[in-house]
């Protein structure tokens, strides 16, 4: 099972993860990314190219499934303006055993941060905004899965 959702709507973490829990595995791991106040940030804005981004997320799940014995995986990503404190991404993986689910979840979020075509702009409390550059730390984490 593979679920990819990209939406402007608020993320309901339990919805996607419930589908994974129903697969009968012994391990279900997930990661939820929350928008944080990083030096006066009030919200972030995420833009994407829908068909390209969706295809990229499907490929990530396919790559994870090829590496680990997964029963299923879910990626839910929010776009548009997302306020501080709100979930922006939920990644989950289900497998027969915990190790595969945990590793696959780490792989999915690490690779998503560098491979999925999202563009992020931070909006600050003073009304200003700026586009965010890619981070070397994200590249380093993704490289460990090469």
Image (cartoon, rainbow, N blue to C red):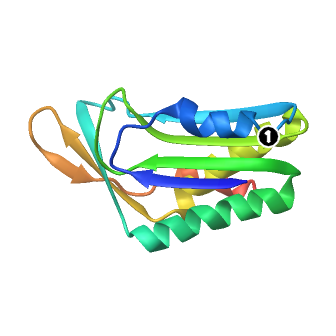
- The answer to whether residue 122 is left or right of residue 17 is left
Q: Is any part of residue 102 visible from this angle?
A: yes
Q: Quadrant of residue 127?
A: top left
Q: Quadrant of the N terminus?
A: bottom right
Taking depth in this image into account, of 132 and 109 the one nearest to the observer is: 109
Residue 34, quarter of picture: top left
Quadrant of the rendered image containing residue 30: top right
Residue 125: x and y in percent read 14, 32
35 relative to 81, above or below:
above
Placement of 97 over or under 4, stated as above or below: above
Q: How many marks?
A: 1
Position of residue 119 measured from the top left corner of the image (x, y, whole percent) = 36, 60
Find numbered disc 1 in the image and state the secondary structure of the residue it sits on: loop
Residue at 50% across / 53% down in the picture?
5
The residue that disc 1 covers is 23
Q: Is residue 141 visible?
A: no
Does residue 96 appear to the left or right of 74 in the view shown? right
Q: Looking at this view, name the residue that lies furthest to the bottom.
A: 52
Q: Is residue 53 left or right of residue 24?
A: left
Residue at position x 68%, y 55% in the image: 2
Label 1: few (<14), some (14–19) or many (≥20) C-alpha neighbours in 10 Å = some
Does residue 9 appear to the left or right of 69 in the view shown? left
Q: Residue at x 76, y 57 (%)?
A: 64
Give percent across and percent down for residue 17. 63, 35
């Amino acid at each position: 099972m593979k679920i990819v959702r990209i939406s402007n709507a608020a993320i309901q973490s339990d919805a996607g993860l419930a589908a994974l829990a129903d697969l009968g595995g012994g391990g279900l791991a997930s990661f939820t990314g929350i928008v944080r106040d990083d030096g006066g940030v009030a919200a972030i804005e995420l833009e994407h190219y829908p068909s390209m981004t969706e295809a990229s997320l499907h490929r990530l799940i396919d790559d994870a499934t090829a590496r680990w014995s997964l029963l299923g995986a879910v990626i839910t990503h929010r776009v548009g303006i997302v306020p501080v404190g709100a979930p922006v991404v939920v990644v989950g993986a289900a497998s027969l055993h915990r190790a595969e689910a945990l590793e696959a979840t780490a792989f999915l979020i690490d690779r998503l941060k560098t491979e999925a075509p999202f563009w992020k702009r931070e909006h600050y409390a003073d009304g200003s905004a700026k586009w965010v550059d890619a981070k070397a730390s994200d590249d380093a984490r993704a490289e460990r899965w090469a």
